[in-house]
Amino acid sequence: MEHYIPDWAKEMNCAVTVCDKEGNIIYMNDKACQTFYTFGNLIGKNLFDCHNKYSLEKINELLNTGGSNCYTIEKQGIKKMIYQTAWKEDGKVSGLVEISILLPDAIPNHIRS
């Protein structure tokens, strides 16, 4: 019996972009498409063609180590948190996922024990 898996990321209120091990973009949810609409359809395009040297080094590092990277950015007064992490199949790195989340001006920090 085949199990239905919904496109859970499609309408999320954050941008989700997925690439394969070679850096080819294989998935973008609606928010990611809206974010990069001026560049046209990026599915099938390669990340290595549109990033600076530092970003390319980080992408390669994540693909080679299977690691994660998290940082914040501010552009035109809009703050975002960027989370990048490897995705795997059978324990082997198969690509990267990037989730970009809009941040409010103030974020509560709850300390739990």
Image (spheres, grey):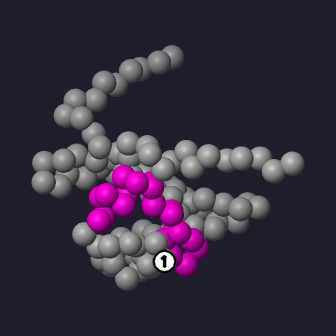
Residue 70 visible? The answer is no
Which residue is at the front of the view, 96 or 64? 96
**Residue 85 falls left or right of residue 79:** right
3 left or right of 43?
Answer: right
Left or right, residue 35 beside residue 23: left
* Residue at 51% from the left image edge and 17% from the top image edge: 113
Please report the residue visible at 33 percent of the width from the left and 78 percent of the height from the top: 50
Residue picked out by circle 1: 44
Q: Residue furthest right?
A: 1
Q: Identify the residue shown where x is 48% and y is 50%.
A: 10
Kindly tell me whether residue 53 is visible in this rendering. yes
Identify which residue is drawn at 25% across, 69% down: 38
- Which residues are the magenta region? 16-37
**Magenta segment includes 18:** yes
Question: Which percent across, then down, holds residue 20?
Answer: 57, 71
Q: Residue furthest left?
A: 76
Quarter of the image where one finds residue 69: bottom left
Q: Secondary structure at mark 1?
A: loop
The amino acid beneath tag 1 is Gly
Residue 47: x and y, percent? 42, 75
**Tag 1: Cα neighbours inside 10 Å, few (<14), some, or many (≥20)?**
few
Counting labels gives: 1
Q: Residue furthest bottom?
A: 49
Q: Is residue 82 left or right of residue 77?
A: right
Toward the viewer: 31 or 105?
31
Residue 69 vertical placement versus 103 (above, below): below
Q: Is residue 107 above or below residue 85?
A: above
